Amino acid sequence: MFNLTEKPRRNNLWANIDWITVLIYVLLVFMGWFNIYASVYNIEHSSIFDLSQRYGKQLMWIGAAFIIAFIIILIETNFYVFFTFFIYLFVVFLLVLVLLIGSEINGSKSWFSIGSLGIQPSEFSKLAVSLALAKYMSTFGFKIHRIKSYFVMAIIILVPVLLILMQKDTGSALVYLSFVIVLFREGLSGVVLFFGTLVVLLFICALIMSNLVLNIALLAITLIILFIINPKLKQFGFTLLFFGTSFGLIFFFDLLVNTNFQPIDLFVISSLTGGVTSIIYFARKKIKDSVTIFVIFLGAVFFSLSVDFVFNNFLMPHHQARINELLGINSDPLGVGYNVNQSKIAIGSGGFLGKGFLNGTQTKFNFVPEQSTDFIFCTVGEEWGFVGSLVFISLFIALVVRIILSAEKQRSVFSRIYGYCVAVILFFHFMINIGMTIGLMPVVGIPLPFFSYGGSSLWSFTILLFIFIRLDADRLEQPIMLNSGN
């Protein structure tokens, strides 16, 4: 399976552990615990060890997480490589099973309820996908630009995504976009990231602009780009002639037949006709760049027209409302925008140094919903202010950067890819969660790693991180494994 180019060297496992990363993890976990205590503090249950309260239960989850981390360190790294696809299939099975017998919480049928304990399989699916991608992409002879490779990688990522979307848990599914960065690190063309960014921008523009204005803008941009890369007046003139003729013929056809087309209908039909004619013209002239531009133009037109259908039929009403609120399409500060407004008030009220531990009025009087889970960062901002927020953000960024640097040092392709998966998953969770608390991201309901209340998220992130810590500790003991395809 692998080219072995060096004999393994045995070293002391515990001496090789990245204790700085472990320390950052422990600091984040305990900072999260104290902030959960502050966010739901109950004077009648003032003991932070009270197991009847969320902070007491979180302590149990923390204790269990530390035990899990210790067990992971003891397990040989070959276990994770060998059982990768078994783990993946088992998690996919759980994602299917939760659709059948799971409990519905906050509109999402994504939980197994075992007494008072709730387990969310989608939290563990990110771990399974990370292992599966690392396993597949580290196989001997793998080449990322093959059609087969694209297909297999898409299956590994999209199967859990589709099952999670069926559970109506859009927030968890959104995190899977982070795997594109891993693929980019392993050789995926930057063109994919470029067009992915354009798709997101086009999606946003289609929501905030009328279809007619957007498609006129797309045509104008297309013609400008065409002239820049192919500044021959004759060919540019033919293009204008094709589109002008198409507009004229469709317009007069509408007048003669009285079809009562809307302006957007006339423009789209004319654009498609002119675009196809231009493609045929430039194909005959063997000008591939111009053909590509008009193919992209037609694709953009179809995509922009499909946005409304996708938005209205595939997103939950509360997700639609939150996106509309974020983009300024609607304003409902006492309704769908209430959470974010209260969150920003809480964070802003903390000022530079904060109000002090247990002195947060916004959180203490429950002005911020979900303040111990999705909006836990509000407590940090209100009670610890700018300085406390900066310390927390710095710790988290330091953790992500350290994981990336460690991933680059790996001698095993599997370990490197898995390390990048860990880094981007943690970063996307962090970015989206912090972004939604300050109004830069739609409220999609994903936890802040190691901070938010809940056993499933804490355990899944702990397992995700400590498998990499274990792989990194074994770096010098393992032979170099080279993927000849990269």
Image (spheres, rainbow, N blue to C red):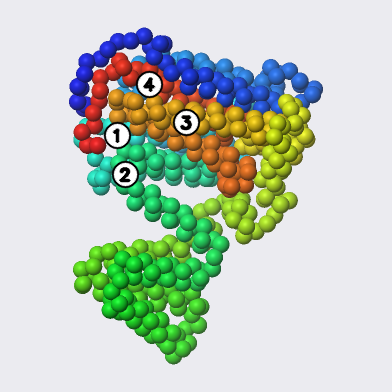
**Can you tell which quarter of the image residue 420 is in?**
top left
The mark that comes first in sequence, 2 or 4, is 2
Q: Are marks 1 and 3 in contact (CB under 8 Å)?
A: no
Between marks 1 and 3 in the image, the one whose residue lies nearer the viewer: 3
Q: Are marks 2 and 1 in contact (CB under 8 Å)?
A: no
The mark that comes first in sequence, 1 or 3, is 1
Residue 481 x/y as whole percent: 25, 25
Q: Quadrant of the N terminus?
A: top left
Q: Are marks 4 and 3 in contact (CB under 8 Å)?
A: no
Residue 414 x/y as whole percent: 32, 28
Considering the numbered disc 1 on the image, is that residue within a helix, a strand or a loop?
helix
**Can you tell which quarter of the image residue 57 is in?**
top right
Residue with the mark numbered 1:
136
In space, the residues marked 4 and 1 are separated at their CA atoms by 19 Å
Residue with the mark numbered 4:
472
Considering the numbered disc 3 on the image, is that residue within a helix, a strand or a loop?
helix
Q: Quadrant of the C terminus?
A: top left
Between marks 2 and 1 in the image, the one whose residue lies nearer the viewer: 2
Residue 311 x/y as whole percent: 52, 57
Q: Residue furthest right?
A: 44
Considering the numbered disc 2 on the image, is that residue within a helix, a strand or a loop?
loop
What amino acid is labelled 4 in the image? Asp
Query: Which residue occupies the foreground of this view, 221 or 308?
Result: 221
Between marks 2 and 3 in the image, the one whose residue lies nearer the viewer: 3
What amino acid is labelled 3 in the image? Val
In space, the residues marked 1 and 3 are separated at their CA atoms by 24 Å
What amino acid is labelled 1 in the image? Tyr
* Residue name at image x 27 percent, y 42 percent: 144
In space, the residues marked 4 and 3 are separated at their CA atoms by 15 Å
> Dot 3: few (<14), some (14–19), or many (≥20) neighbours within 10 Å?
many
